[in-house]
Image (spheres, rainbow, N blue to C red):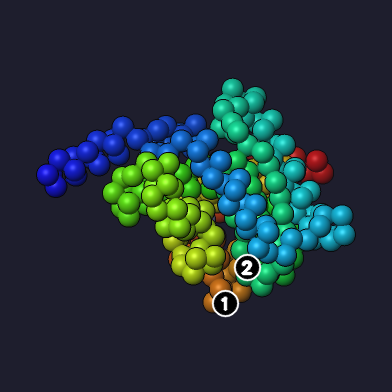
Amino acid sequence: MKNIFSLLVILSILTGCALNLATGRNQLSLVKESELQLMATSQYDTFLKENKVLSAGTSKDAAMVDRVGTRISNAIAKYYDSQDKGSVLEGYKWEFNTVESEEVNAWCMPGGKVVVYTGLLPVTQNETALAIVMGHEIAHSVARHGNERMSQALVQQLGGMALEVALAQKPKETQDLFLLSYGIGSQVGAMLPFSRQQETEADQYGLIFAAMAGYDPREAIPFWQRMSAAGGASPPEFLSTHPSNATRIRNMEQFMPEALKYYTPGN
Ligand SMILES: [Zn+2]
């Protein structure tokens, strides 16, 4: 019986792999992105209700977050359309919110629901570095890393249950897994770091996304040096130990020539 069950799980994993158009990589994807986007909409609303959201009308910081997010989302929409890959952003309804919190963090839920914490801004220090971080978070979302993590969690923790069933039978547990999968661990008092491969992809595509939006990707190097120095207190998802900061900066330098191809100063 147990063997049959394992076989079923393996089969569902084999058939659940999908080619990701953004990264060109085969990824575990047991959950429909549209289902995750639906879940994200309600989780995002709940999060915003439970936290202090700054208004872009009265807060310069919130206006900056909104401006950076809008520039990046417009630039990548234009890019994917031009590549005939508009489906990468299917169902996206972007929102960019700034939340008052000491946490040095930012994240993007499926469908383009972004939050930046004010605790991040003393480390970014300028709009270009903020674009590096937001590009990174948006890259996690576009590369569907959350889907990959959520699919793994459904297999490992809920025995390969479908998302709908899991939500009906174990709503709290499923919601917690969702938040963990998208780097919102502080809400549930735990962390689930993105894998090294996912982090490297997010760094690579994040640089390109920032560059497409007219932000100089070279700012990533001094920014990650500042992040490295600020490490220790409440590590955010992008300060996770994979890859180490030194490796990360080396990777960034490798990705830089490609990212610079997409950069036109003064956009
Ligand atoms: Zn990351």
Query: Which residue is outermost to the bottom?
Result: 233
| Residue 219 locus on image (x, y percent) | 68, 57
Q: Is residue 238 above or below residue 189?
A: above
Q: Is mark 1 within 8 Å of ligand 1?
A: no
| Tag 1–tag 2 contact (CB < 8 Å) | yes
Residue at the (80%, 41%) spot, across then down: 267
Q: Which is nearer the eye, 62 or 208?
A: 62
Residue at the (84%, 61%) spot, across then down: 59
Q: Amino acid at mark 2?
A: Val
Q: Which residue is mark 2?
A: 104
Q: Is mark 2 within 8 Å of ligand 1?
A: no
Q: How many marks?
A: 2
Q: Which residue is mark 1?
A: 233
Q: Secondary structure at mark 2?
A: loop
Q: Amino acid at mark 1?
A: Ala
Q: CA distance from mark 1 to mark 2?
A: 8 Å
Q: Secondary structure at mark 1?
A: loop
Q: Is residue 200 above or below residue 232?
A: above
| Residue 179 locus on image (x, y percent) | 51, 56
| Residue 24 locus on image (x, y percent) | 45, 34
Q: Is residue 24 above or below residue 112?
A: above
Evaluate whether residue 114 shows in this view: yes
